[in-house]
Image (spheres, helix red, strand yellow):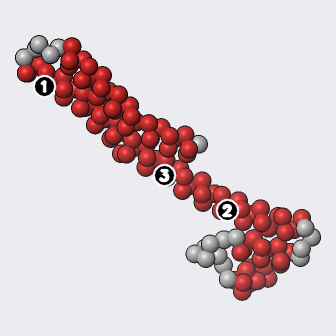
Amino acid sequence: MFFIIGAIADAFPALGIVAAVLGVINTMGSITEPPEVLGVLIGGALVGTFFGILVSYGFMAPIANFVNKTFEQDGHYLGCIKAGLVAHIQVYAPQVSIEFARKTLTSSVRPTFTEVEDMIQNLD
């Protein structure tokens, strides 16, 4: 999902450039007009470029980054569950399976061994 959003974010500057080129082509068709008219046409071409860059870097790229970080966090959570289940399926003792799962967590969120033991002891 976030790959699609990132690809769309990467495409918007190119669409802005296409808008600028089309604006310049439109301006060249009106080259005999006075400078006031040409200025408006050239300004319209530049607005297309600005809009493409604004949408890309101002909206779509931050959304893509947010979705990417959310998926990464969910992936770490599911990886922890997977490690515990795989260890349990391989007939390790429950405490060992929990240790396999605990080791997959990053140090910033990983409980210590004694914290896990205390939680297991207080399950009753």
Quarter location, residue 43:
top left
Which of these two is toward me, 48 or 108?
48
Does label 3 or label 1 sit earlier along the sequence? 1
Does label 1 or label 2 sit earlier along the sequence? 1
- Furthest-bottom residue in view? 114
What residue appears at the point 24 percent right and 17 percent down from the top-left corner?
A: 26
Residue type beneath disc 3:
Asn
Callout 2: helix, strand or loop? helix
Callout 1: helix, strand or loop? helix
Q: Which residue is mark 2?
A: 77
Specify the label residue 39 is tagged with.
Answer: 1
Q: Position of residue 66 (x, y in %)?
A: 49, 52
Q: How many numbered discs, if any?
A: 3
Q: CA distance from mark 3 to mark 2?
A: 19 Å
Quarter location, residue 54:
top left
Which of these two is toward me, 63 or 25?
25
- Vertical placement of residue 16 versus 72, above or below: above
- Front of the two marks 3 and 2: 3
Does label 3 or label 2 sit earlier along the sequence? 3
What residue appears at the point 77 percent right and 66 percent down from the top-left corner?
A: 83
Disc 2 crowd, CA 10 A, few/some/many (<14, 14-19, 20+): some
Specify the label residue 65 is tagged with.
Answer: 3
Specify the label residue 120 is tagged with.
Answer: none
- Taking 95 as reference, is 32 left or right? left
- Vertical placement of residue 4 versus 47, above or below: below
- Taking 106 as reference, is 89 left or right? right
Q: Position of residue 50 (x, y in %)?
A: 28, 37
Q: CA distance from mark 1 to mark 2?
A: 56 Å
Q: Position of residue 120 (x, y in %)?
A: 78, 79
User: In the rendered image, is residue 2 in sight?
Assistant: yes
Viewport quadrant of the C terminus: bottom right
Which of these two is toward me, 65 or 114?
65
